[in-house]
Amino acid sequence: MNDYAHIPEETLALYALQALDPTESAVVRAHVTGCADCRAELASAQGDLALLAMSVEQQPLPEGARERFLRRVEADRPSAGLSIVPPRPRKRAAAWGGWLAAAAMLLLSIGLGIRMRSLRWRLNETSLQLAEETVESRQAHQVLDLLTAPMAQHVLLTAGKTPPAPSARAVYLASRGALVMEASNLKPLPADKTYELWVIPSNGAAPIPAGLFQPDANGSASVVMPQIPSGVVAKAFGVTEEKEGGSSTPTAPILLAGAAPAVGE
Amino acid sequence: MTDESANPNRLAGRSSNSSSESAATASDESLLEQVRVQNQAAMAALFDRYGGMVYSVALRVLKDSGNAEDVMQEVFFQVWQNPQTFVARRGTLGAWLLVVTRNRAVDVLRRRKPSDSVDEVVLAAKENVAVEAEQRTLMEKVRTALNKLSIEQQQSIELAYFEGLSHSEIAAQTGEPLGTVKTRIRSALISVRRAFQT
């Protein structure tokens, strides 16, 4: 978990519903990636949505839907292409005898085809049954062998040293439009790129650009009192990478994001 | 399709063949393991188990049988091609399929590109909908919970969940403040959740 405030549960529910605007969704997505608490709450919200789906009255499938799906599956098999036999060139039949022979062959082919399909289906079913019965047994033996093997290596895994993650802290006073942000551990950018800070208004309006910045050699940077309108209640703040000179709208992905706590929290 | 096959939940068990019955009663995990090795019978068993629910959810959102079948086919074909997309920590397979289906159906309804990856859908759902009787019980329970919601809450859920409107669109359509819409949706979901905690 990072140092930012958590995403409000209401917002996580809307995110699960896909009912947020794209910018808001990007902020939430960026946050939940690094926040186990919010991920857990989001999973709960997704579970709620599954329950809602269960309220739907069951309808019969359209006629042939199952067969259409299974045909598609059959056609997708890697070996399916090998079984396709190009049609033979058609020849004019000179006599009824030829037609009758062809019809007999056709009936025979259809019969064999159905029989083969049936056998293949039963083979699949049988292999499924056998596999299911043996999987558990095999796995149990494998686990036992591993745990009792004298040559097995027992290793304790702990968290290793990881490079410090980029982060930023913002202090914002909406009534004055005053904002200070300090960032650290930022990766350097090419000369034609810049970082840009954004204020995400809580009323759903477009994100407001709040200053461009480049990190120093230590990866540190700051934005102090950028020109932004006063009175904008912020829902969140974000940092994106933009072309030199900045942008009027944020370009995904949002590299850093933080939800603004309620005033006074 | 015959009348019998119209109900996908009966389809898997209609054969007298004991191996068919095995496929019908096998766990989702066993079937997915077989799907990973391209076993079509296992895929058919999953389709029989969940096809009706998946199609019904898509139809509820899209109100068009052709589009709903397209979404259903896409969702199941994704399972066939990438069975590893679903892992147990994402919740139960049935619940996961329903959420993915609803999201895809809304994408179609709103004519937008898929707005999330199925990899993002992780659920904390414990309900097992693999059995038809269980599905019926759950449906009754959720409906009871929904009926207890206020009219405004029911409307917000309808617009957000089944019509795929954003919170700002719902606020504009209902004339309610954005904050009210958010709170209403959240409290409605909590009410449904609580119905399963008691």
Image (spheres, coloured by chain):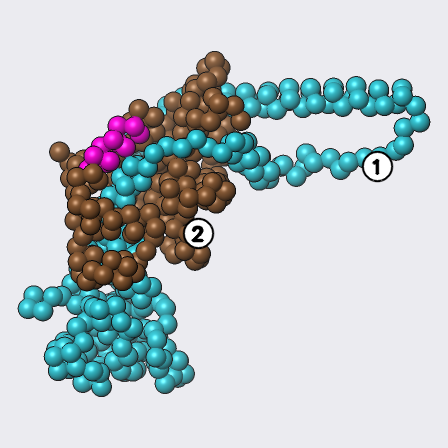
Quadrant of the image containing the N terminus of chain A: bottom left
Which range of residues does the magenta coloring cover?
B135-145
Chain A: give its colour.
cyan
Sort mark 2 into few (<14), some (14-19) or many (20+) by Cα contacts within 10 Å. some
Residue drawn at point x = 32 percent, y = 37 percent? A56
* Relative image position of residue A159 (x, y in whole percent): 23, 54
The vertical placement of B29 against B73, above or below, is: above
Task: Say which quarter of the image contains residue A226.
Answer: bottom left
- Amino acid marked by disc 1: Pro
- Judged left or right of residue A261, residue B1 is right
Task: Name the mark on residue B99.
Answer: none
Residue A211: tell me if it is visible. yes
* Relative image position of residue A92 (x, y in whole percent): 90, 32
The vertical placement of B68 against A34, above or below, is: above
Task: Name the mark on residue B108.
Answer: 2
Chain shown in brown: B
Secondary structure beneath dot 2 equals: helix
Sort mark 1 into few (<14), some (14-19) or many (20+) by Cα contacts within 10 Å. few
Give the CA separation, mark 2 to mark 1: 43 Å
Q: Nearer the viewer, mark 2 or mark 1?
A: 2
- Of residues B14 and A130, which is closer to you in this image? B14
Quadrant of the image containing the C terminus of chain A: bottom left
Q: Main secondary structure of the magenta part?
A: helix
- Amino acid marked by disc 2: Val
**Residue tagged by mark 1?**
A89
Residue drawn at point x = 39 percent, y = 56 percent? B115
